[in-house]
Amino acid sequence: MKPTRAFRTTVGLVTVLALTACGAGATAGGGAAKQGGGITFLIDSLGDTWIPNNSAISSFQGHIWGHVTDKLVYVDENGKVSPWIAEKWEQNPTATEFTLHLRTGVTFSDKTPLDAAAVVANLDIWSKGDPARGINPIGLFPKTYDHAEAVDAQTVKVFFKAPTLGFIPTLGYHGSILISPKTIALPAAQQADLSNDIGSGPFVVQSWKEGDNVVLKKRDDYNWAPAALGKQGPATLDTITYKLVAEPSVRTSAVQSGQADVAYNPSPQELKSFKDQGFTTATPRYLGFVNGYAVNTKVAPFDDVRVRQAFQHGIDRAEIISTVYTEDWLPAKSLFQSNVPGATDRSADFAFDAAKSAELLDEAGWVKGADGVRAKDGRQLALTLYSNPYLAASKSIDELVAQQLGKLGFKVGIQSFDVVTYGERIKLNSPTVPAYEITRSFIDAGTVAGVLTDANKGENWFGLGQSDQKLVELATGVARAESVEARAKVLDELQGYVLQQGYYVPLTQIVQRIYLQSPKLTGVTYNGIAYANYYTASLTS
């Protein structure tokens, strides 16, 4: 089949029931785990392409890739790295050369070996992509990558142009999925057909329908899961069906009525009610940036540091948590989640202080008019926030932020788009977008330098290029550190500087992936990027 752009659908409960391989009851059965069966996972998007490099970091498609593919290392929710396909590894003293020793007997689902040659092919495509074929490099893969060599069938040596301390942890990033070299060699149009995408994971694609569903079935000969999961051999479940259902209420109602097993991204405010009814809810935090706004310094009024700082201190984050969220959410303490190794408490740099915000705006020459909106040189202090469709509560947050900033004299508009439209319209460094609500995971803080400036083809979040030499110096210092100890001090200084300059405006520690699950579904695990793993899961009878 030739894939077309994905679209959203709202599916009635009868349709959901027809797809359910094994419906779960609405109350805890208390029975023993059983072998086999299938679960239905209701999700609000399936993205717009299945090209592995272009879709593996999607919050939605990452669920499927996490079951169809493996990674070289496993990273848990605390950032701890442990062996997976790479059994062990070494690095030289300057963190510029790494040697990976691969597990024997691992094969892709087409029975070809996952050997050193396959790993080299994956490292190359992650690093460079293939622009001529429309294949992107993997975001946050180290820009310092030079090349890799297959020493023998089970050994890979990897070379970097500069110290790259974050290389090994980043092998556990959700974009770093191991794909068969046969798939890598295909034209992009054929890679976009999910049935052509061959991995080595515990499930394979049984069927898929663009913009509607993906059905996975277990691989009977799988036997190389990471030891951290405490299980080997094939998965217990027979199938996982991912079904696109746009409306949150339809997703949650299907789980409540036993017609589905998992509803993705229910409303945070409903979680307590679901728990009280006996359902399982999960709000795992991922490793990465906190939820917040990356400020485009090229777009007025944020080309003035005082306005950025006023924006920074004008948001009452405690009110966001108490109004929009529950006790499962934590206040931001920096631009990084607090479970990220190397994150420090920088709360004071962006603490809510309405009086300070007003004073900064006064100093910058923005004067309140009779309507309460500040103006300068005939221009209102106006901006538009674009709600992030990857975050269930984004619009509610933006509405509350708009109210808070409105009291200070900002005029704030809000626009919302679906995932595909958002990706098309809200581009980094757009001349019309003053702030981007970022939800970005990463495994190791050493990789964040690749997003803060445009050095080494970085993403240049703040529109600064390399004009802020101190930011460049700090980011480079973090990226080029040769030890965790040497990096820690620079990383702390980088966090403080970005916040003090108002480049990044934290909101809350992010729970991007929220799960409502049947109490009959047990044994689910969550990795460092907060994806649910059903390899270890089972249904109770």
Image (spheres, rainbow, N blue to C red):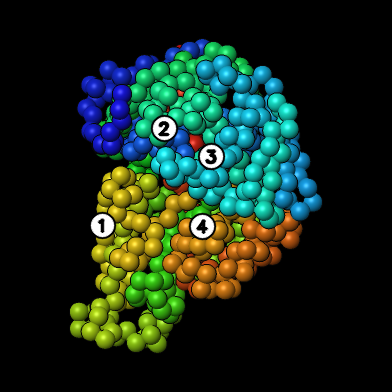
Q: Marks 3 and 2: CB-CB under 8 Å?
A: no
Task: Pick out the residue farthest to the right.
Answer: 93
Of discs 4 and 2, which sits in the foreground?
A: 2
The spot of residue 197 in percent (x, y) is: 45, 27
Q: Would you say 186 lies left or right of 403 here?
A: right
Q: Which residue is mark 1?
A: 415
Q: For the residue labelled by badge 4, is the local secondary structure a helix, a strand or a loop?
A: helix
Q: Which residue is mark 3?
A: 125
Q: Between 76 and 399, which is closer to the camera in this rendering?
A: 76
Residue 385 in the image: above or below residue 153: below
Residue 391 in the image: above or below residue 467: above
Please give the name of the residue rendered at 61% of the width and 21% of the height, measured from the top-left corner.
113
Q: Marks 1 and 2: CB-CB under 8 Å?
A: no
Identify the disc placed on residue 187. 2
Q: Residues within 10 Å of mark 2 (few under 14, many from 20)?
A: some
Residue type (three-letter) at the residue carrying disc 1: Gln
Question: In which quadrant of the rendered image does the N terminus lie?
Answer: top left
Mark 4 vs 1, N-terminal side = 1
Identify the disc placed on residue 457. 4
Q: Visible in this render: residue 174?
A: yes
Q: Marks 3 and 1: CB-CB under 8 Å?
A: no
Residue 391 in the image: above or below residue 507: above
Q: Residues within 10 Å of mark 4 (few under 14, many from 20)?
A: few
Q: Quadrant for residue 400, please give it.
A: bottom left
